[in-house]
Amino acid sequence: MAGHSKWANIKHKKAATDAKRGKLWSKLSKAIIVAAKQGGGDPDSNSRLRTVIADAKAVSMPKDNIARAIKKGCGGQEGDAFEEIVYEGYGPAGVAVMCDILTDNRNRTAPEVRKIFEKHNGNLGATGCVAWMFDRKGLFVIAKDKATEEQLMEVALNAGAEDIKTEDAEFEVLCDPDIFSDVRQALEDAEIACLSAQVTRIPQNTVEVDVQNAKTVLSLMETLDDHDDVQSVSANFDITEEAMARLDV
């Protein structure tokens, strides 16, 4: 299974725990603030805001929290000056890793992220060192018992999706990030539930990792994802069937 879909499913399983701790809500609040500040507080005319609000609702973030974050973004209060940064680097076995960051202090975030890479036998690289290996896409992961391929072709492709792929017990629907909200709405209208839905970076090629490196790579991904300033993390690893059978994920 390709690294991006594997990680999407792990994140889905972790979401309930993260929401209980409030960490995921905090990250989404930052994303809402930035989206509202850049494109205004009306989700009907701000596709980025519309997408983040949908993400927030998917993890039961309270409406008051969402409204408060939108207000902060539109008001532009001091102290909410978040900076968007992309960090790139390598994990074990040469796995390429990209992190989307929202931070109010890059001098704090950079060394913390660098330390996470180093603790997992990796290293933080220069800007552009791995970005060329990825394409930014909207990704929907759907269990095969929730829809047929024919249904997805009718609903998703008609909404503008680019491709539908089969991955074991799941379908992957890919689309341009600019129409992510449209495809998401079409799936919701058709009552097709998603295991995960996100705008992410899809690797053009993957690095196959054995069980030991797989454990380290997954630990790296989870630790990065748990960092308060990391909004999303992508990597180009593929886990062998032998490794999958020995991993408890």
Image (cartoon, rainbow, N blue to C red):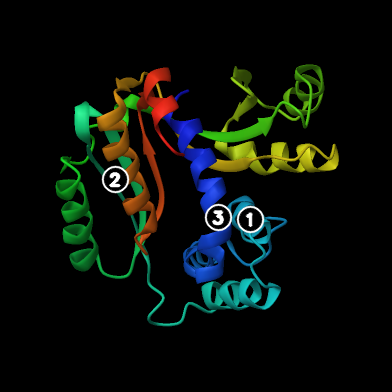
Q: In this view of the protein, which residue sits in the foreground, 218 or 189?
A: 218
Q: Amino acid at mark 3?
A: Ala
Q: Position of residue 213 (x, y in %)?
A: 25, 31
Q: Position of residue 168 (x, y in %)?
A: 59, 20
Q: Is residue 189 above or below residue 54?
A: above
Q: Which badge, 3 or 2, is on the more N-terminal residue?
A: 3
Taking 159 as reference, is 94 left or right?
Answer: left
- Residue at image position (26%, 69%) is 105
Task: Specify the farthest residue to the bottom.
Answer: 78
Query: Disc 3 and disc 2: Cα gap in Å?
Result: 17 Å
Task: Specify the farthest residue to the front.
Answer: 246
Pair 1/2: label in front: 2
Within 10 Å of disc 2 (Cα), the crowding (few <14, some 14-19, many 20+) is many
Taking 197 as reference, is 87 left or right?
Answer: left
Q: Which residue is mark 3?
A: 15
Helix, strand or loop under label 3? helix
Q: In this view of the protein, which residue sits in the foreground, 111 or 185?
A: 111
Q: Is residue 62 above or below residue 35?
A: below
Pair 3/1: label in front: 3
Helix, strand or loop under label 2? helix
Q: In this view of the protein, which residue sits in the foreground, 243 or 198?
A: 243
Q: Which residue is mark 2?
A: 220
Helix, strand or loop under label 1? loop
Kindly identify which numbered label has been placed on residue 46. Answer: 1
Within 10 Å of disc 3 (Cα), the crowding (few <14, some 14-19, many 20+) is some
